[in-house]
Image (cartoon, rainbow, N blue to C red):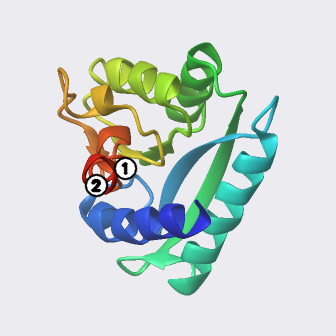
Amino acid sequence: MQKGIGLTVAVALTAIVGTGSANADKIKIGVTATLEGTYTVLGEDGMRGYELAVKAHNGKAGGKEIETIVGATDASPDSAIRAVKKLVEQDKVDVLMSPLSGSEGIAVKDWSKTQPQITVINASSGALETTYVDPSPTFYRYNLDGAQWQAGLGDYI
């Protein structure tokens, strides 16, 4: 998982270079992670992957310093929406990397349809519905979905 999130971060860093940050010297990235509840260990692992990817890019994207603001979730859709709303409305992030779980992904994708000013990079939600079913114009996936993970299994069996 850590390698996948690190790759997603690297791609996202490339993708967000063109975002118009209010602060010309800095880009604010809001990251949600399951830092509460059953999947806390996965959230901590994901954050280590994120931090490693940012460090590999010297803490910059497109020459701008990266400022990371973390929103904790418990892998539920409600907690994910609370976290992303805070990151966007109060912390004024330029881009979001969210979420971990499939149900969080669907909720954040649906929410993003009401927020055309914010780009959401799918961190690791494998729900097919996040990008295949009724997609949001501002929610992007750079990782595999759950159906793609299983694609070769049928031939193998």
Q: Which amino acid does label 2 sit on?
A: Gly
Q: Find out whether the residues at labels 1 and 2 contact each other: C-beta distance under 8 Å.
A: no
- Residue 113 appearing in the image: yes
Residue at 42% across, 48% down: 94
Dot 1: what SS?
helix
Measured from the top left, where is residue 108 in percent x and y?
43, 25
Q: In this view, does 63 lie above or below 70?
A: below
Q: In this view, does 3 lie above or below 149?
A: below
Q: CA–CA distance between discs 1 and 2? A: 8 Å
Q: How many marks?
A: 2
Identify the image quadrant of the N terminus. Answer: bottom right
Residue at 24% across, 63% down: 18
Q: What residue type is labelled 1?
A: Trp
Return the residue at label 2.
Answer: 152
Q: In this view, does 128 lie above or below 16?
A: above
Residue at 31% across, 39% down: 147
For the residue carrying disc 1, how many other residues have a C-alpha within 10 Å: few (<14), some (14-19), or many (20+)? few
The quarter of the picture where residue 120 lies is: top left
Q: Is residue 95 above or below residue 56?
A: above
Dot 2: what SS?
loop
- Residue 24 appearing in the image: no
Q: Could you say which is closer to the camera, residue 30 or residue 125?
A: 125
Measured from the top left, where is residue 124 in percent x and y?
48, 47
For the residue carrying disc 2, how many other residues have a C-alpha within 10 Å: few (<14), some (14-19), or many (20+)? few
- Which label lies toward us, 1 or 2? 2
The quarter of the picture where residue 126 lies is: top left
Return the residue at label 1.
Answer: 149
Residue extending furthest toward the front: 157
Measured from the top left, where is residue 28 in percent x and y?
51, 55
Residue at 52% across, 38% down: 99
Measured from the top left, where is residue 54 in percent x and y?
56, 74
Q: Could you say which is closer to the camera, residue 63 or residue 146?
A: 146
